[in-house]
Amino acid sequence: MQMTYFPEIVQVVPHSDYTVSVYFSDGKIVSYDVKRLLDKGVFRALSDERTFMDTCCILNDTLAWDVKRTGDPADCIDIDPETLYALDAVEDRLAVS
């Protein structure tokens, strides 16, 4: 059985357009667009831009929002890391002037 290496998420950077730049340990960067989820279930809490920006973090080893601000991984909204890694790589938005 061959083991597949799965890179670790090392940084997440939310943007005011409801996207998040996700940085992986192998150098891959992806952009996750949350806009299509904002009217669905638990994601409604993220429709407030301040909540979206201020609670974005890494929990459960993936992109998450600690909307209850407890630091408890069981209380967060998170995205499957395999879903994130499957996205096409993008240029680093932070490096673009």
Image: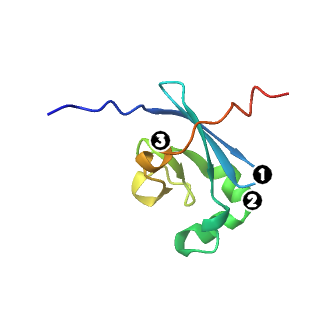
Residue 48 point in image, percent of width and height: 72, 65
**Of the residues shown, which amino acid type is indicated by label 2?**
Glu
Q: Residue at x 63, y 74 (%)?
A: 39
Cα distance, mark 1 to mark 2?
A: 7 Å
Q: Which mark's residue is nearer the viewer, 3 or 1? A: 3
Q: Residue at x 64, y 66 (%)?
A: 36
| Total numbered circles | 3
Residue 74 point in image, percent of width and height: 39, 57
Q: Give the secondary structure at mark 2.
A: helix
**Of the residues shown, which amino acid type is indicated by label 1?**
Ser
Read off the residue under disc 2: 49
Say the numbered circle drawn on residue 16. Answer: 1
Q: Which mark's residue is nearer the viewer, 3 or 2? A: 3
Read off the residue under disc 3: 85
Q: Are marks 1 and 2 in contact (CB under 8 Å)?
A: yes
Q: Residue at x 68, y 58 (%)?
A: 51
Q: Is residue 15 above or below residue 67?
A: above
Cα distance, mark 3 to mark 1?
A: 22 Å
Of pointers 1 and 2, the one earlier in the residue sequence: 1
- Left or right of 74, for residue 36: right
Q: How is the image coloured?
A: rainbow
**Of the residues shown, which amino acid type is indicated by label 3?**
Tyr
Closer to the camera, 1 or 36?
A: 1
Q: Residue 43's quadrant in the figure?
A: bottom right
